[in-house]
Structure formats: structure tokens, C-alpha cells
Amino acid sequence: MKNRTLPILIAIFITLLYGYLTIYTLPSNTFFTMDNSIRFIHVQSILQNNFKDIYIKYPGEHLDPNFQFFPIRPPWKTLDLHIFIKNQKAYSMHPIAFPFLSTYFYKLFGYNGLYLIPILSSLVSLILIYLLANKIIPQYSLFSLLIMGLCSPLFFYSLLFWEYTLSIMISLLIFYLFCNNKAPSKFLYLFIGILLGINSWIRIETIILSIIIPFTFYFIYPKNTLNTRNVIFLIVGFTLSILPLILYNHWLYGSAISAHNKYVIKNVSDVQSISSFYSMLHDKLINFYRLWFNGAVSRINNAILFILTFAIFLFSIVQKYKKILLFLLILFLLNSLYICYRNYLHCITFITGLIPVVPYIIFILLVIKKLLQDNHTKYIKFILFSSLSYILFTSIIADSDGGNQWGPRYLLSVLPILIILSLYSLSIIKSSSSHPKIYQGIFFLLCLFSFFIQCAGFNLLFQGKKSQLVQLKTLENIKSKVVVSYSFGFSTENASLFYKKHFFWVKDQDSLEKLLSLFVKNKINNFCFVSFDESVIKKNKYKSLRWNFNKIIKEKGYKLNNKIFVSSWYVYNEFSYSL
């Protein structure tokens, strides 16, 4: 028990650090991305509905009953992928479990309560990775906790109102129960199956892991009556917990595989010719490349990272030319240093690549051939094949790289396993290499680089939320409750005001004229039109917005009272009715 006091204290300390950064350092009532803010809008709506309904209430519905100007719009300027309209009600197309659970904590603790599940999930995950590492690589068990807490994207995602740390915790618990199952019990496998299904309620992409795990277990472990029975109980447990989700998805979205994933299937089914197939294949390869190698520095740097990773993989398979392999690893180290330097000092965008954000996993490739040999325990092979299969299939199936994120969010469920496998690979290298200290030093430096990359992610998050707070406070102080914009993300960027203001979205001049007619008819005497700054409109991607909204608004009888330049992006134009 004494031996476990220190890791538990360290886990608590790291978790308290997460809490401190979230509550006392990062600006409150602001969110990292549209995915986070829609979940918060959903939480507010569930609370307003007194937990009796799950649709998203539309404050402007009395003016716009057909949802023609509904403000929550993704970049594609449609309702698809974020909001689903059914029976004149708006439903979130994101998983329901996390926002519904979070509503209770929001009701009790306000804004800070939103982060209770993400942070507590991280605490449990840190304890679990220590316990699992203590079984597989006891000499590195404490180190695994530190790496996961400070040198992995868990750091970043613990500070967000997002369900990823909860999914990481459940996935890690599943692997821990598998590897620590000293006395196999059918009821334990039933419970693990239920956990697999529950994880799919949290993050739908983990259904891939739920399919992979029973297959991997069946082929890795001896094919006897006992293990066949265990696989059956796994499947039964998974079916029991996933069936309600399938029925829910079918009832609400008309798709058993969820609202999001039906578009992945649709994109594949839409392939009708060789050219469209090649186009889809091209998109998949680009997406795969971004999920693994995009370090948010430059295309050349990403290409170098890809070449070095592939070369290390090839030379490790050959198991010759060890000096060349070490040389390539040093080049990889230097490249990771450059990625770290650029992101730490000049961080302007998001990292979507797995290898740039956790470069130490390259050690898995260094000994991949040895890991595939038969002289390792069954659970080592089990976690190896399960985790690598998951990231491979998810990278192929995923329809995008995930957008704004810090590390590939679709692959996070097996992040702790990759950390353990990296440390296990280091232990193999140390016992077989003639230069163990060099390899150990490289591993330590890669972990250090990863720590600074996580710090860069925090800084990017802080700066983004800081500028968001400025526009939030400015909008809050504007007298009018009616806000109109052609920016698809403006209402979600101000999610804390979604039920304090009436947001509307217009896509072009015609829709603005129709909305203004509604304003005049319903005697809306003042409103704020949020436009882009002229420097933004000059960009080619926004050339469709180069129309004179002032002229259209004035023709409807409104005059401009005030113009506030909030940031390099937005201008708040306050109008009032003058006729």
C-alpha cells in the first residue's frame, strides 16, 4: 500500500493542476471549438427543459418557426453534422450521454461543473495506467503516469468540455480488466462487454475498438471452450449496452450507426465510377497522412517526418544496419525538436498528427518485429494488436482529420496503451542494445519535447479563449437582444449567451432581406449585425460575402447607430428602426 501512495499523490497533484488551469487560468464561459460549445448549448437546453426532453430550444423560434435562420451552422452552411431537425425541433447530432450527465454538474456548480467529468476521468485514467504499467513494466510504472499526465494530449483534453478523457478512462479500464484477469469469470467478460457498449455511447468511433477486441482476444488466446465462452459473454454484454443506442439513433436520426457515421457510409456508397473511387481514395490517404504526420509546422517538415518514420520502420524490420537505424532515430529526434520549437514559440494552428504530438511512440516501431514474435505474454500481444488495429482502421474509416484539436482526437482511446507499449519497447531495447543509455536519453528527450508541445497547446487554447472572452463581453454589453450574422460559427462562439440573446444566421443577401422583413413585421426595433472585418472579407475564401449589408438594412428602414471593431475578425454593427 505504501508503494502506491506516491503514484496516487502524483495523480492527484496532476489532476489538481488540470483543475487550477481550467478554473483559475483559462477564461470562463468560453470554449475551444464548435463541438464543445454545441454541447454546452445542449446542456443549457436540457436544463431549461427540466431534463424532460433532449432537443435544443431555439430562442428565435417565435420569429422563425421553420428554422430557416437557425444559427448553429457548420462550415458547410447546412444543418448536417451538427444539428438535425425533426418535427420542427433541433436535435444535436453529437452523442447524448456526455452532455446529459454534465447537465447535473452544471446545475450544481455552474460553468466549473462542466469540467468535473473530464478532470475526474483523467484522475482515474492516471491511476489505471499506473496499475496496468505496474503489471507489464513495473520499472516504468511511475514514469508512465508522468508521461500520460504531462507529456500526452490528456493534458490538453482535460481542460476542455469534451468527452475524450471519459472515453480514455473507459477504454483503459477495459484493457486493465483484460490484463489483470487472474481468475477468468464469465460475469467479468459480460461486464467488459457492457463497458465496450457504454464507450460507444460516449464516443461512437470506439465501436471500432468494440469490434476489434473480441476478435483479437479470440485469435490471441487459446481456442478452448473457456475462452470461446468468454468471447460469447463479451459479445452478449456489448449487445445489451449497444442495443439501446442503436434504437435511439434509429428513432431520432433514421440511422442505426449514428448521425455522424451515416455520412461516412454515404460517402462510400456514393462512389459510382473509377474517378470517384480514386477521388475518395485520395481523400482517405490525405486524411490518413494528416492523422499520423501533421505537425502544424510545414508540409516539408511533415514529409520529412513521414520519410524518417517509414525508414525507421523498414530498418527495424530488416534488423540490420543498427548504426544507420540509430542515425535515423537521431534525425527523428532533431526533427521532433524542430516541431517542438516551432509550435512552442510560434504556435498558430492545431496539431492533428499522432507522431508529432507523442513522438516517443516511435520506439514501438523500433522493436515492432520483436513485439510480433511469440516470446511475449498473451496480454502484451493482446494490447498491441488491439491498439494498433484500432488506430489503423480508425485512420482509414475516419471521414476527416477531426478539425480543431491537439493530437488526433479519434485515436485518443488507445493513447494510454501506446504509452505503455512505448515504455515496454524501451525496456526491450535497453536489454538488447549495446547503447542502452543513448536510447534511454533519446526517449527521455522525446518525452520532454512532447511536454513542451502540450504546453504550446495550452497556450493556443488560452489565447483563443482570451480573444473569445473579449467578443463575448462586448456582445453581452450591447443593448439589443437580437443578433444576426453570416458567420456560421458566431452563435456557438458565444454559447454562454445563446439563451440570453436571439441569434440568427443569414447565408446571403436574399435571406437577410427575408429576415429583415420578419423584423419589421414583428416590430423588432433594434438588432446587431455581426460582420467580418474588411481584412477578412478580402480573402478569397470569403469573396461570396462581399455584398453591401448596410444598404440592404437601410432600405428596410434601419439606421446604423454604432460600429464596434471587436477583433481582427468581427465588427458589431448596431442598428435601430428609424421609420
Image: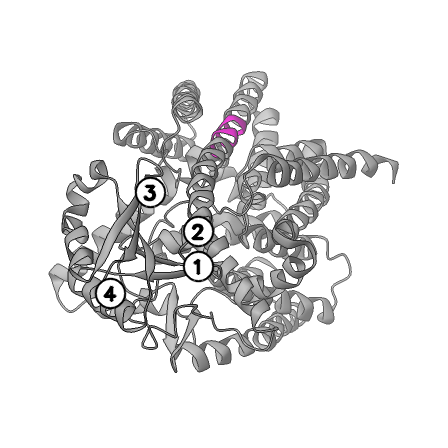
Q: Comparing marks 2 and 3, which lies closer to the viewer?
A: 2
* Label 1 with label 3: CB-CB less than 8 Å: no
Image: magenta residue range: 450-457
| Whole-number angstrom distance, CA of label 1 to CA of label 3 | 38 Å
Q: Amino acid at mark 4?
A: Leu
| Whole-number angstrom distance, CA of label 3 to CA of label 4 | 43 Å
Residue under numbered circle 2: 494
| Whole-number angstrom distance, CA of label 1 to CA of label 2 | 10 Å
Dot 1 or dot 3, earlier in sequence:
3
| Whole-number angstrom distance, CA of label 2 to CA of label 3 | 29 Å
Residue under numbered circle 1: 501
Q: Amino acid at mark 1?
A: Lys
* Label 1 with label 2: CB-CB less than 8 Å: yes
| Whole-number angstrom distance, CA of label 1 to CA of label 4 | 17 Å
* Label 4 with label 2: CB-CB less than 8 Å: no
* Label 1 with label 4: CB-CB less than 8 Å: no
Q: Using the rendered view, name the quadrant where residue 191 is placed.
A: bottom right
Residue under numbered circle 3: 290
Q: Check the image and report above or below for 41 versus 361.
A: below
